[in-house]
Image (cartoon, grey):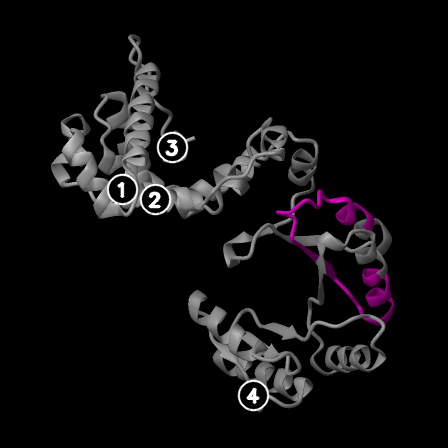
Amino acid sequence: MLVAADTRRPAAIEQLQVLGGQLGIPVFCGDRANPIAICQAAAMEAGKEELDCLILDSAGRQHVDAGLMAELQALQKAVKPPETLLVVDGMTGQDAVKSAQAFLESLELTGLILTKLDGDARGGAALSIRWVTGRPIKFIGVGEKPADLEPFHPERLAGRILGMGDVVTLVEKAQETLDAKAALKFAEKTSRHELDLEDFREQLKQLRKMGPMESLLSLLPGMKGALKNAQVDEREFKSVTAIIDSMTPQERRSPRIIDGSRRRRIALGSGRTVQEVNRLLNQFDQMRKLMKQFGGKHGKKLPPWLPPGMMGPP
């Protein structure tokens, strides 16, 4: 159960309720006045319901605010949580170290959560905070969605910092998000050279479930330099899907029948240009040729663990 103990920021409670609804997790609000009373009541409620995890969401604060820091100390003393985690903005650099050190002096911290590591921050703050506080970093945030909060693995972050990628995390994302049966079916159809635009559309949908493309590509070895001056336009995926959705089932199964008049109709139906339709069809044709190389004369097959859609449009 989540506990809305942030009574200071406008709409903080409503925001947590929306998040809880998305995740299917109950949110305890109490009387929305005293954070300590709210947390104490939530702890009693959790005991009655025999819940195994209770997350107290306290208000964000600066360590220089003595009144708010005293409130945290009183809350920790009243509720006695087994874990007290400090959430630190990874983009603040060395300032985060000073903040973490000040919190450590006032509270019994058991761990840290470092956020915004999907930006330009490369983990320097993580190394410093760990050294200064002596507390473990338990989770890192690499995006804005709940699924973007992942357990912290030092060796994986080191790989990202050095541009070596993080294939293990990529595979874990695929295993958690994608349909294994669909992936195997896709690999088998590819090995038989039977891939069509319906399969392509489904693979794009599967790929989008794994998160932003730029974040996924950054997990691949050697992509750090390639992505430095490149931007991945996420809207391109919506355009591609719109174009494919504007085709008839027969056209999706047999793209070769799409002549000039059909291309104009598809462009009009998807709100895109004929040039964009042509580009998609050309890219799909190139992809099928590449898939044939995987099949080859020796009967090679795509590995079943290959994340579906990874052979999508450049």
User: Is 141 located above or below residue 164 in the figure?
Assistant: below
Instruction: Measure how far apart labels 1 and 2 are at the Cα level.
Output: 6 Å
Query: Mark 2 Cα within 10 Å, few/some/many (few <14, many 20+)?
Result: some
Q: Which residue is mark 4?
A: 30
Q: Which residue is mark 3?
A: 312
Which residue extends farthest top? 297
Q: Which residue is mark 2?
A: 239
Instruction: Measure how far apart labels 4 and 2 are at the Cα level.
Output: 45 Å
Which residues are drawn in magenta? 99-128
- Label 4 or label 3, whichever lies nearer to me, is 3
Query: Mark 4 Cα within 10 Å, few/some/many (few <14, many 20+)?
Result: some
Residue 222, position in %: x, y? Answer: 60, 26
Q: Earlier in the sequence, mark 4 or mark 3?
A: 4
Residue type at numbered disc 2: Ser
User: Is 43 located above or below residue 135 in the figure?
Assistant: below
| CB atoms of marks 3 and 2 within 8 Å | no
Query: Is residue 105 magenta-colored?
Result: yes
Residue found at x 33% / y 40%: 240
For residue 290, side relative to residue 140 (left or right): left
Residue type at numbered disc 4: Gly
